[in-house]
Amino acid sequence: MEFSMLGPIAVTTGSGELSLGPVKRRSVLALLLLQPNTTVPLDQLIDFLWEDEPPEHARTVVQGHVSRLRATLAEGGASAHGIELTTHGSAYLLRLPEELIDAHRFGELVARARPEAAPADAVPLLREALGLWRGPALTGTVTSPAFAAAAHALEERRLTAVEALARAHGALGEHEQSATILYSAAVSHPLREGLIAALMRALFRTGRQSDALEWFHRTRRLLNEELGVDPGERLSGAYEEILRAEAAGGQS
């Protein structure tokens, strides 16, 4: 049995994917997976499930979803995997081996990777970690600020791994691969200055100076238009580094 958070919320067994029911039920499971082997108060579940004022019967609704989740997991053979959803007063606990959660496996793989010290080993570890993602994290949960913040935190971890993979390729002298990896992320996150700065350096090291400088100017315009700010130290530093290297007639 495997639990997926890095994309649509899902539970998969050897027989296929379990039917988890409506959005709020999937959201209950998502919050329990965000805090595995930890008691999650009923009030916290309510805060996550309702963006506005919760209805008077919110507690009953949550209790019903937990009951159905417990039955669904049991029907899927949860006990054989050491999985148990229990009630502790006005809180719930999803007890399970954390390696069954894709986000946990992702974190373990990223933690083992050392992009600068051991780049040849880091590349397959990071590629395996990023391969666990099947779309935006926590897809299928309610659109509350709490879930949006949790999804954003997971996305930040993904981007950090993308940048680490690019650094590993760069350490191996594989700058084309580094640029390709960073390009896709930069298109999706055009205001992430550290990512753009890394892409600029990778492009420059492949001999694409004009492309590197164009990314700086494009990002500077976006920062001004969207946020009303100038480029920060990392982006400006990459730009100046490339200009100095060009003036010196080489590639840094």
Image (spheres, grey):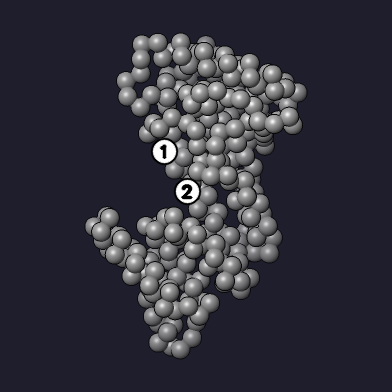
Residue at left offset 41%, top offset 78%: 210
Left or right of 172: which side holds 223?
left
Give percent across and percent down for residue 74.
Answer: 68, 18
Could you say which is closer to the camera, residue 52 or residue 172? Answer: 52
Tag 1: Cα neighbours inside 10 Å, few (<14), some, or many (≥20)?
few
Quarter where residue 221 is shown? bottom left
Give amino acid for label 1.
Ala
Name which residue lies at 53% across and 77% down.
206
Return the x and y of residue 25 as percentages of the image width and height. Answer: 51, 22
The spot of residue 69 in percent (x, y) is 59, 19
- The answer to which of marks 2 and 1 sits earlier in the sequence is 1
What number is the disc on residue 156?
2
Residue at point 58%, 44% (across, down)? 134
Query: Which residue is labeled 1 in the image?
Result: 149
Q: Residue furthest bottom?
A: 249
Figure check: 84 above or below 124: above
